[in-house]
Image: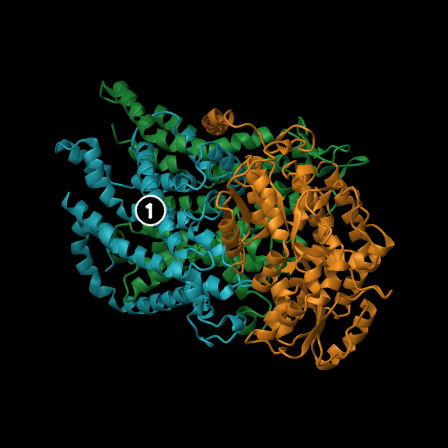
Chain colours: A green, B orange, C cyan
Amino acid sequence: MSTETLTTTKGKPPSPRAGQAKNRRSETRWAIYLIAPSIVLLGIIIGYPIISAIVMSFQKDSGLDASTGMFVQGGFAGFSNYAHWLLQQCTAPTGAVTCPPGNLGSQFWNATFITFFFAFVTVILETVFGLWMAIIMNRTFKGRGLVRAAILVPWAIPTAVTAKLWYFIFSVDGIANSLFNTNILWTSGEWSSRWAIIIADTWKTTPFMALLILAGLQLIPEDVYEAAKMDGTTTMQRFWRITMPLVKPALMVAVLFRILDALRIYDLPAILTGGGGGTGNATTTLSILVVDQIRQGPNSASALSTITFLIIFIVAFIFVRFLGANVVRTQESQQKGKI
Amino acid sequence: MKAARIAAVAGIAVAGLVLAGCSGNSGGGGGGGNGGSGPASQNLTGVGPITYVQGKDNSNVVRPLLDKWNAAHPNEKVTFKEQSDQADQQHDDLVQNFQAKNANYDVVDVDVVWTAEFAAKGWLQPLTGKMAIDTSKLLKPTVATATYNKTLYAAPQTSDGGLLYYRSDLVKTPPTSWDEMMADCSIAKKAGIGCYAGQFAKYEGLTVNTAEAVNTAGGTVVGADGKTPTVNSPEAKKGLQRLVTAFKDGNIPAEAITYQEEQGRTAFEAGKLLFLRNWPYVYNLAKTDGSSKVKNTFKIAPLPGDGNGKPGASSLGGHNAAISVYSKHKKTAHDFLEFLQTEETQKFFVTQGSLSPVLASLYDDAALNAKFGYLSTLKTSIENAVPRPVSPFYPAVTSAIQDNAYAALKGSKSVDQALKDMNDAIAAAGSGS
Amino acid sequence: MSAIAGPATANAEKRAVTTRAASRSGARRRRGWQTTRTGISALVIVVWCLAPFYWMLVTSLRDVGYTFDTTPWPTHVTLDNYITALSTNLGNHLGQALLNSLFIGACTTLIALLVGTFAAYALARLDFKLKGIILGVILGASMFPGVALLTPLFQLFTNWGWIGTYQALILPDISFVLPLTVYTLTSFFREMPWDLEEAARIDGCTQAQAFRRIILPLAAPAVFTTAILAFISSWNEYLIASQLTTTATQTVTVAIAGFTGSQPHQEPYTAIMAAGTVVTVPLVILVLIFQRRIVAGLTAGGVKG
């Protein structure tokens, strides 16, 4: 993002005004005042835990003192906590071994795959449905109020209740099986449990997408459409040539934040399938692994949190850099006329 | 660009660094609380108001008890801090508060399987010397769950044991061994219903059921030290193989792989099961639930055994009450523990909460037996029970059991491989990571 | 027409009036077909969104002894579950929790919007270096697994004596929604026609006045959407609330999670569903009311200004 800032600054036509430097200095001062509250808040609530996780991740978890049977501090760990996850290295009485199944370390790559799978599928489904819902809601028709109220419902139900609700719906003797006359083990089949989570998540979070996209749609002046209609364009043409480009900034913000959230998914799989699902680990995501590990050893869990953070960071970077979810670029081009 | 990214993270770092200095890392071990110094030796004679911490009070048992205590001890009032009803969250809440050395968590209600972990972290006051309590009248296995490293760390408060629910209209005499029960499955087949179910979803209940199968067959999961795995044995194999075989030939219906306590109860009440392993709470519900089709056609028996005349080895549920080493008023806390174990209190647990007492004599109480028909069977169950592995690494041990037993039940892993992996995973847990 | 579409319409009005009249007759036939299609789509959306909620409602009205009945319409109807959910006899405090959640949600929304608007204005409008880095830092706050924040925050707030206070929930809640708030508002502020602001400043408004009177009303749909997102995010927060609250500051999510059956192991689905209904319906109504009032108010101000 910052490159854009730099290039545009450089590429800006020399201002005819003499007070530009002074102007900029004053704007910088204002910017500091305006942004400081956000940064301080995030620094305390999010920054501090991240730092403390990084510090902890280089400490060994406490082990038992054989003579007293009590836990003692583990000492400096180097990168062993990271190796535990990334390379599946465990310590056994005989020395370093590959983590056996049943040890959380052995589940890392599986959990990474599951997390990405969920994120990929749910974000695509939610984007498509969300866009569709937003477009419908943006039209004028009788009963639009009902649709808007209905769309809020899945999202207004607290996630903890949502998970219970779907758990109830998807139980063996539940309404889902009864309605479709099936006998699917929704919470324990390998793929059925994954789909159960995807369905529940899509139901729950599509409104988030829809509302953000709707806000973007509402900023498109109607006359743009009217003019295009006069020119004899088809609905599809108008969608691709007018709606999409104009709604893109809002859409990209929505998708970006959905990806970040989806990669940290915890509640739904934890409650719906107990984090297990088919084969025992079919729905174990990285966040679930973190929670399980916190109970077994918080320092090793900190390493896993840090790894997860880095993974999400890389994904976000790629998304912003290559898929054009760049909030700054459009802004700079818009501002060229300013000053 | 890349540099800017790194700087971005550094930005968060700078903001957080200021705080990182404030409170040190307290994620690690608590340091031995066993010795002569440290918090375990302080405030032993402290008297004053205390807090009692427990998970959700299901049937309003705690409040009336506290009212009674508070009326008798106006200067040593006990306040109730109620946690959520989720065991995992209760565990995490306790850990958070112990790590923060919270002096306001005086007496805590600890699930039997957490006792060793908390004791080894140095968070629980050893009940020795001035703090000692009388355990002679309690059921022996319940005392074992509160003991770590030969020291008693908590007062057994309530217990729970597995029972075999069976359809008395279809089976005249309940099976006393696993093989007999499997032989009775032909009856279920004829009636067109499932034969047996327990708790086989991948959660704590699976550990309970797996441990029962292993222990009943004469095996063990973890050695006496709480960290050496002993589960890769012919006996353990015999036990786990029973469950796997039953799944394979349909004696345990396929959907039982999703069952926790409630799903099993629902299926049994709907008349879809011949045998069900479950806790005592099912007894009264199955007799009274509107949708129950088996109100008058079920009975209970001890869990089926190995065929040597002894009943099966149930895993133990229940809770222990422990004193935090950080409590300021340990004398009051100690007296409160004794209050929890009086006959009157224990009786109230049964009558008000349908909880299973730890006091042996109550199981033979005629009046109680008349109202709670399961008590005498439950006594047999608890007397023959084996605590789940008493290990300070219990979270890792239980996940090792669940993962591998689940894979074996689903048929994606052989029993031999599952037990070997289970053994290795427990070994890894005991040696650091 | 709902108020939420107001600003866009107002903005378009000036130029659109003439073109619209011309195009109207020509497109009428196509519009008839489109209305049908819209109707079908709307119906599908409503069914998809409400079906699980309907099941929640049906279950919540069912006698607890028939919890797993799968008749698709209400049977064994009773209001007992609502009484269970709302009574305080068993230590459930759903009523108090509702007030807590409303209060925490309102504070979170207001502060997050205020702080977020400051930052977004600066990012969208002011010229300064390191903009990319600041956006990166703000986004970075949404990348750490939320579950791992709990332990450090618990220790921090214990040191500060904040356990069981409202700010112990409000501050984290703000932090969780702030990145989204800043990003959304930044991206929307940038779409605004800034020449209007310039014009206002020439008319003698200060920069702040111009922003408040011109830009903010124009961005009303975005601001309102962001407010809903922030409010519901705080409303839904469970993890932090479950460990940093006492009975007095308990939120609805924590209160509902605390629901239990009369027996251990027994999951009181019917009561949970009743409680779920109790907390969902007022929220939806509230949002709809606010949508009309607030956005209508802002829009009106915008047109006048």
C127 horizontally vs B120: left or right: left
Residue B176 location in percent, x, y?
A: 80, 69
Q: Nearer the viewer, residue C61 or B78?
A: B78
Please state, as top left, top right, bottom left or bottom right, where the C terminus of chain B lies in the image: top right
Q: Nearer the viewer, residue B69 or C153?
A: B69
B78 horizontally vs B376: left or right: left
Element type at mark 1: helix
Question: Residue at the location (22% across, 21% down)?
Answer: A17
- Answer with the quarter of the image where residue A158 lies: bottom left
Question: Residue at the location (60% across, 68% down)?
Answer: A172
Residue at which label 1 appears: C106
- Any part of residue A227 in sight: no
Residue C48 location in percent, x, y?
A: 44, 65
C84 horizontally vs C288: left or right: right
Chain containing the residue with disc 1: C
Question: Residue at the location (85% across, 52% down)?
Answer: B233
- Any part of residue C42 in sight: yes
Question: Residue at the location (50% across, 37% down)?
Answer: C154
